[in-house]
Image (cartoon, helix red, strand yellow):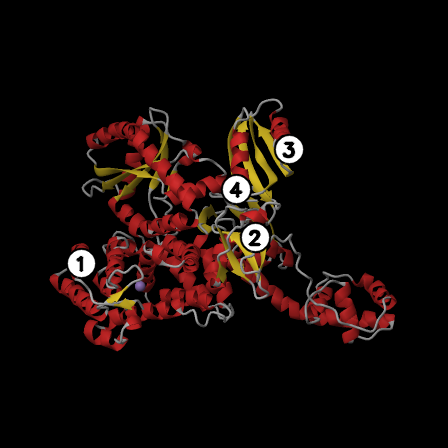
């Protein structure tokens, strides 16, 4: 990899400078000079191995492993073996050295780490075999499988990916998109799950900077302006807190934090609000050294700080978050509250001990470091539980790589909530889980026989979605059985697979019964159960499968009534028989097709209905085997999913102005404002008569003097839309108007 050329004096200078920087960081983490010597040896070895090789950027290649090692020690907090492995991570892949060479020089552990990293790299970057189903999904499976051996491999891989993101400007555009999408789909959720806050948020910001450069720049500029404007107010807010904590004898530091551009962008999009409407732009963090001399525990001291600051400022009762008593499942602990400053802005305050802060920033590694030091009690931590769960998924034999990737992805992004059993026992369960999921989480037997639930003593259906703090009692009946409809609302993987297993067993039984029932009925009507009859019936009952098992099953399970049998058979005889060439698959519904770029004339372009990009949006396309290219917004989650799995199918369509002029695209505008008589009428009249824009649908409602809703309308391009938004903003009463997802 990379080009070879002689290094000049400047190259050597840069290498020396970056390494000195790494060494300084490593010194703090290494326990003795011996360890530091091994780091030095690894650097010299790698430096020699990559000598004369440059990256795409033109820099000496060795700067990359140095940077990865720096992230490993500074952002993730790993020790010297990981630093050494990071320095050596590309040696085996890119040079003539082997894992055995590494083993004889640096020992078993380092060799195993480097081997794991080499395996991941070989599969991730191998594009030649990409036409096979999805090599990428297989790759991720391998990455995650390394969780099984040593989590450090995944952590170093995350550092490697972060540095590749930092230097992504040197990549060609289609490769950039593949890397960024993979990063969003797998690496960011993984970093989040492993609690690596600083790695995660830097990746997110880079993702946004390249996927939505305009939004990124606008938000960044606004943050900078706001920070200078409000800095004085924040300092005035902090001053009394500072005095009070000092008076109470705490040892602490206070840090000012601003939300990251990505988290602001995300909030604006998800909630359909403008930058100005984000009220928790600022956070103040209080990090204290727990005083071991007092009787107060670390936890008590968090509440002590809370009580001091809420004595100074009014707090928002519904915004207190207690992750001290109930740590998040990535191990995060802190006490959050939102206070009203004397100048009238809401400021979030995060209270953490030094230990909690380390865990919040560096995640898993810090977690284990403290555990070793005896801070954690013998309990399995949330993090360990999660890793055990991932291992569980990884070893299930009958999932293919693509399903597995989706499963892991879902598992990475879901969070847990806390609920209670009737006896007041605390249980954590996936957010969005239903009462029935809860039943299965207690015991299969309870799930299988559930008929209803009592939540907080009120009777609810099994599909009831649980909320934090709910107390759930499951009502069962002895001869109840799992039902197929349950799959429509069950959320957790465990419950779903238990129900599916049950139904599978039932299914074989039902198929047998169904086939027998059908034979008898046909017999009575004078027909025989043969291929010809089966074809007619499957067509008639709209079962688009290749085998008749599904038909038998539905009959046997009572999902399909045979009362219409005679009609179907009769109707098919009326039709001119002779050719039996049914197509077994229902043709997919075709959306209106828009040609967006005719440059090569080879492909047909289709606008993706999940994100509905319009001319001017940053877009990415996916080439299907029939030559059709589906065009998504670059930020579309579906597009990220596809790009992460099928990176080789990415194409970069460009909007072509002249050709799109006569086409219109559907967008949604979400509006909010102060209600006055006739405002809704004003808005719709204004859009359709004055601006002459075609409204497809609108949905505006008012409540307590505030109106809120959306309008779906057709526009030509981004320019059109911008103009429209600017004009609508002038209508009296409208407070915010933004484009949101349809
Ligand atoms: Mn690398």
**Which residue is label 1 attached to?**
10
**Which residue is label 2 attached to?**
596
- Closest to the observer: 482 or 210? 210
Is residue 449 visible in the rendered structure shown here?
Answer: yes
Is residue 425 visible in the rendered structure shown here?
Answer: no
Q: Does dot 3 land on a helix, a strand or a loop?
A: helix
Decide: few, some or many residues near mark 3? Use Cα within 10 Å; few <14, some 14-19, many ≥20.
few
**Which residue is label 3 attached to?**
688
Disc 3 to disc 4, C-alpha distance: 18 Å
- Closest to the observer: 394 or 373? 394
Q: Position of residue 565 (x, y in %)?
A: 82, 64
User: Which part of the image, by quadrant, shows the N terminus?
Assistant: bottom left
Q: Quadrant of residue 691?
A: top right
Left or right of residue 174, residue 51 in this image: left
Decide: few, some or many residues near mark 2? Use Cα within 10 Å; few <14, some 14-19, many ≥20.
many
CB of mark 1 near ligand 1 (< 8 Å): no
> Cβ–Cβ below 8 Å for labels 3 and 4?
no
Q: Quadrant of residue 485?
A: bottom right
Q: Is residue 5 positioned above or below 75 on the image?
A: below
Decide: few, some or many residues near mark 4? Use Cα within 10 Å; few <14, some 14-19, many ≥20.
some
Left or right of residue 611, residue 369 in this image: left
Taking the spot 47% from the left edge, 55% from the top edge, the residue there is 640
Question: Which label was assigned to residue 583?
Answer: none
Q: Nearer the viewer, mark 3 or mark 1?
A: 1
Taking the spot 74% from the left edge, 65% from the top edge, the residue there is 555
Disc 4 to disc 1, C-alpha distance: 46 Å
**Which residue is label 4 attached to?**
718
> Cβ–Cβ below 8 Å for labels 2 and 4?
no
Q: Does dot 1 land on a helix, a strand or a loop?
A: helix
């Amino acid at each position: 990899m990379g080009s070879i050329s002689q290094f000049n004096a400047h190259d050597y200078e840069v290498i020396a400078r970056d390494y000195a920087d790494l060494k300084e960081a490593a010194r703090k983490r290494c326990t003795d000079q011996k360890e530091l010597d091994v780091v030095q040896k690894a650097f010299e070895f790698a430096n020699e191995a990559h000598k004369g090789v440059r990256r795409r950027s033109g820099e000496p290649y060795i700067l990359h492993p140095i940077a990865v090692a720096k992230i490993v020690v500074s952002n993730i907090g790993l020790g010297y073996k990981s630093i050494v492995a990071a320095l050596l991570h590309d040696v085996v892949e890119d040079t003539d050295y082997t894992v055995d060479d590494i083993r004889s020089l640096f020992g078993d552990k380092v060799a195993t780490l480097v081997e794991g990293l080499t395996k991941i790299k070989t599969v991730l970057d191998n594009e030649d075999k990409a036409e096979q189903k999805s090599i990428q999904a297989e790759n991720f499976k391998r990455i995650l499988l390394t969780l099984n051996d040593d989590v450090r491999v995944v952590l170093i891989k995350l550092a490697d990916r972060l540095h590749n993101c930092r230097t992504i400007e040197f990549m060609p555009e289609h490769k950039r998109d593949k890397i960024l999408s993979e990063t969003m789909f797998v690496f960011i959720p993984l970093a989040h799950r492993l609690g690596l806050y600083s790695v995660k948020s830097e990746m997110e910001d880079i993702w946004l900077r390249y996927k939505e450069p305009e939004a990124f720049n606008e938000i960044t500029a606004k943050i900078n302006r706001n920070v200078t404007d409000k800095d004085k107010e924040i300092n005035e807010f902090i001053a009394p807190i500072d005095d009070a904590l000092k008076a109470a004898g705490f040892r602490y530091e206070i840090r000012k934090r601003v939300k990251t551009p990505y988290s602001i962008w995300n909030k604006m999009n998800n909630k359909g609000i403008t930058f100005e409407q984000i009220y928790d732009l600022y956070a103040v963090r209080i990090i204290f050294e727990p005083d071991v001399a007092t009787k107060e525990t670390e936890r008590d001291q968090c509440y002590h700080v809370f009580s001091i600051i809420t004595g100074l400022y009014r707090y928002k009762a519904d915004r207190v978050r207690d992750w001290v008593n109930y740590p998040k499942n990535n191990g995060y602990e802190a006490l959050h509250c939102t206070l009203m400053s004397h100048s009238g802005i809401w400021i979030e305050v995060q209270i953490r001990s030094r230990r909690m802060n380390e865990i919040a920033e560096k995640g898993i590694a810090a977690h284990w470091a403290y555990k070793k030091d005896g801070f954690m009690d013998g309990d399995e931590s949330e993090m360990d539980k999660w890793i055990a769960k991932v291992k569980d998924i990884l070893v299930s034999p009958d999932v293919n790589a693509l399903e597995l990737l989706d499963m892991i992805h879902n598992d990475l992004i879901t969070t847990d909530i806390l609920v209670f059993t009737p006896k007041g026992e605390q249980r954590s369960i996936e957010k969005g889980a239903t009462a029935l999921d809860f039943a299965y989480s207690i015991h299969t037997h309870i799930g299988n026989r559930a008929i209803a639930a009592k939540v907080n003593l009120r009777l609810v259906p099994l599909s009831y979605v649980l909320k934090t703090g709910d107390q759930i009692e499951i009502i069962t009946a002895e001869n109840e059985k799992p039902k197929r409809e349950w799959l429509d609302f069950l959320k957790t993987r465990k419950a779903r697979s238990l129900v599916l297993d049950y139904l599978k067993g039932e299914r074989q039984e039902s198929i047998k019964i169904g086939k027998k029932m059908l034979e008898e009925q046909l017999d009575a009507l004078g027909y025989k159960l043969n291929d010809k009859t089966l074809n007619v019936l499957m067509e008639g009952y709209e079962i688009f499968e290749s085998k008749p098992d599904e038909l038998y099953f539905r009959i046997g399970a009572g999902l399909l009534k045979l009362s219409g049998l005679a009609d179907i058979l009769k109707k098919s005889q009326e039709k001119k028989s002779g050719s039996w060439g049914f197509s077994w698959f229902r043709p997919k519904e075709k959306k209106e097709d828009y040609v967006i770029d005719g440059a090569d004339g080879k492909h047909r372009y289709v606008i993706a209905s999940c994100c509905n990009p319009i001319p001017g949006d940053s877009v990415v396309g996916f080439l299907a085997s029939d030559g059709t290219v589906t065009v998504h917004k670059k930020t579309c989650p579906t597009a990220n999913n596809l790009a992460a799995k099928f990176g080789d199918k990415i194409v970069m369509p460009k909007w072509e102005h002249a050709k799109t002029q006569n086409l219109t695209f559907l967008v949604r505008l979400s509006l909010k404002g102060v209600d006055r008589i006739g405002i809704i009428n004003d808005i719709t009249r204004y859009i359709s008569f004055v601006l002459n824009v075609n409204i497809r649908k609108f949905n505006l409602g008012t409540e307590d003097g505030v109106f809120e809703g959306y309008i779906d309308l057709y526009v030509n391009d981004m320019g059109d839309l911008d103009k429209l938004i600017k004009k609508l903003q002038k209508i009296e009463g409208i407070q915010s108007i933004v484009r949101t997802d349809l």
